[in-house]
């Protein structure tokens, strides 16, 4: 009897500790119009964009939904007046906020082209006190993807971590790193930009728990995509997934004091602090702002095509 109770105790504890989550929200096609808000105020990173509201975005077909498709893009038709606002573009943020959770993104295409700075990320209302988690981000078509945390002071990463990517800095404090935070570069050539698009995109997933943050990427044709990710299952178990490309363990970073409730954000800026600074070294011609103003046709592939987003808690 004692053995039996002990065994059931061990069994129950193991079940409770397994990293299983249930789906709490699912966004597909027009769900993004009711579950997300179009942000239409100025870009804090000084991008050459003019973020438009939902009615304008739909009228100009910068935001388009149908069935299992969400497209958001920048305008690719207008030559801009250098003294006027930037190129029309879209930035969406979720109306709901999430603490510990998992997101799974099924993305077919991401913005490409010189001058583009797309991002899939999460942030709180008060920055950097509530932290920022960048899942998919880069500029000027230059992969590999880089995932990062941005926090207040007192959040650092151990030198050695169980992940397939490469650390580009261990201190997540924005004040100590000139806003850079702690980044991890993916080692998957298809994780970003034109190579990601040629492969038909793939799946990004992020787990935020008291134990830290983990981020995974699987290209669309990978045979390693977990079946619960591929199917957008109602229950998932992140313990059964492969090694993440980016791991940010909480050993020297208390999650509760560095991360608040987060909105999920997807945005597409042009130039901006990072994109403009790297424009020439990334092999793009001339000056980023002039390029954006004068070459609408260069932005025909500057769009996200998202099949769905699932949230688990
Ligand atoms: C767009 O995403 C980048 C990357 O995380 C972020 O730093 C920037 O503030 C975002 N721009 C806007 C307007 O949201
Ligand atoms: C709007 O964009 C979608 C997706 O790119 C496209 O299929 C559709 O034809 C466009 N509609 C118009 C009116 O241009």
Image (tube, helix red, strand yellow):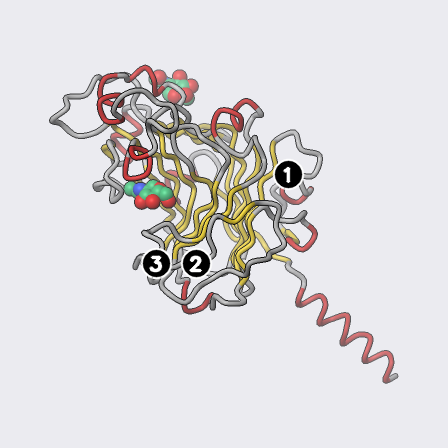
Question: Are the residues tagged 2 and 3 within 8 Å (C-beta)?
Answer: yes
Please report the residue visible at 21 percent of the width from the left and 29 percent of the height from the top.
Answer: 86
Question: Are the residues tagged 1 and 2 within 8 Å (C-beta)?
Answer: no
Mark 1 and mark 3: Cα distance apart in space: 39 Å
For residue 281, the mark is none
Q: Quadrant of residue 57?
A: top left
User: Which residue position is annotated with label 3?
Assistant: 176
Residue sticking out furthest to the bottom: 2
User: Which residue position is annotated with label 2?
Assistant: 171
Q: Quadrant of the C terminus?
A: bottom right
Residue 61 vs 173, above or below: the answer is above
In the rendered image, residue 15, in percent from the top left (x then y), is placed at 71, 66
- Dot 1 alpha-carbon crowd within 10 angstroms: few under 14, some 14 to 19, many 20 or more: some
Between disc 1 and disc 3, the foreground one is: 3
- Dot 3 alpha-carbon crowd within 10 angstroms: few under 14, some 14 to 19, many 20 or more: few
In this rendering, the count of numbered labels is 3
Q: Closer to the N terminus: mark 2 or mark 3?
A: 2
Please report the residue visible at 54 percent of the width from the left and 61 percent of the height from the top.
Answer: 158
User: Which residue position is annotated with label 1?
Assistant: 230
Name the side, left or right, on which 224 lies relative to 306.
right
Q: Nearer the viewer, residue 6 or 174?
A: 174
Q: Closer to the N terminus: mark 1 or mark 2?
A: 2
Q: Nearer the viewer, residue 295 or 101?
A: 295
Disc 2, SS: loop
Mark 2 and mark 3: Cα distance apart in space: 8 Å
Mark 1 and mark 2: Cα distance apart in space: 33 Å
Q: Is mark 1 within 8 Å of ligand 2?
A: no
Task: For ligand 1, give the image quadrant.
Answer: top left
């Amino acid at each position: 009897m004692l053995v039996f109770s002990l065994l059931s105790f061990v069994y129950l504890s193991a079940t409770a500790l397994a990293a299983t989550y249930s789906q709490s929200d699912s966004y597909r096609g027009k769900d993004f119009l009711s579950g997300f808000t179009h942000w239409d105020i100025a870009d804090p990173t000084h991008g050459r964009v003019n973020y438009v509201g939902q009615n304008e975005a739909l009228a100009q077909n910068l935001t388009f939904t149908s069935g299992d498709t969400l497209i958001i893009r920048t305008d690719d038709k207008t030559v801009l007046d250098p003294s006027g606002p930037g190129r029309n573009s879209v930035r969406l943020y979720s109306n709901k906020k999430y603490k510990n959770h998992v997101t799974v993104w099924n993305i077919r295409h991401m913005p490409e082209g010189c001058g583009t700075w797309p991002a899939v990320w999460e942030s709180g209302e008060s920055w950097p006190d509530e932290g920022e988690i960048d899942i998919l981000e880069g500029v000027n078509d230059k992969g590999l993807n880089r995932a990062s945390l941005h926090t207040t002071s007192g959040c650092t990463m151990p030198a050695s971590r169980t992940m397939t990517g490469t650390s580009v800095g261990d201190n997540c404090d924005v004040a100590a790193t000139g806003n850079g935070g702690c980044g991890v570069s993916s080692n998957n050539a298809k994780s970003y930009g034109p190579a990601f698009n040629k492969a038909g995109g793939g799946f990004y997933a992020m787990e935020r728990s008291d134990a830290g943050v983990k981020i995974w990427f699987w290209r669309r044709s990978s045979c390693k995509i977990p079946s619960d990710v591929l199917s957008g299952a109602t229950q998932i178990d992140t313990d059964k997934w492969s090694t993440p490309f980016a791991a940010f363990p909480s050993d020297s970073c208390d999650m509760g004091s560095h991360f608040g409730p987060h909105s999920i954000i997807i945005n597409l800026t042009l130039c901006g602090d990072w994109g403009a600074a790297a424009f020439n070294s990334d092999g793009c011609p001339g000056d980023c702002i002039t390029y954006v103003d004068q070459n609408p046709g260069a932005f025909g592939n500057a769009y996200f095509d998202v099949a769905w987003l699932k949230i688990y808690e």
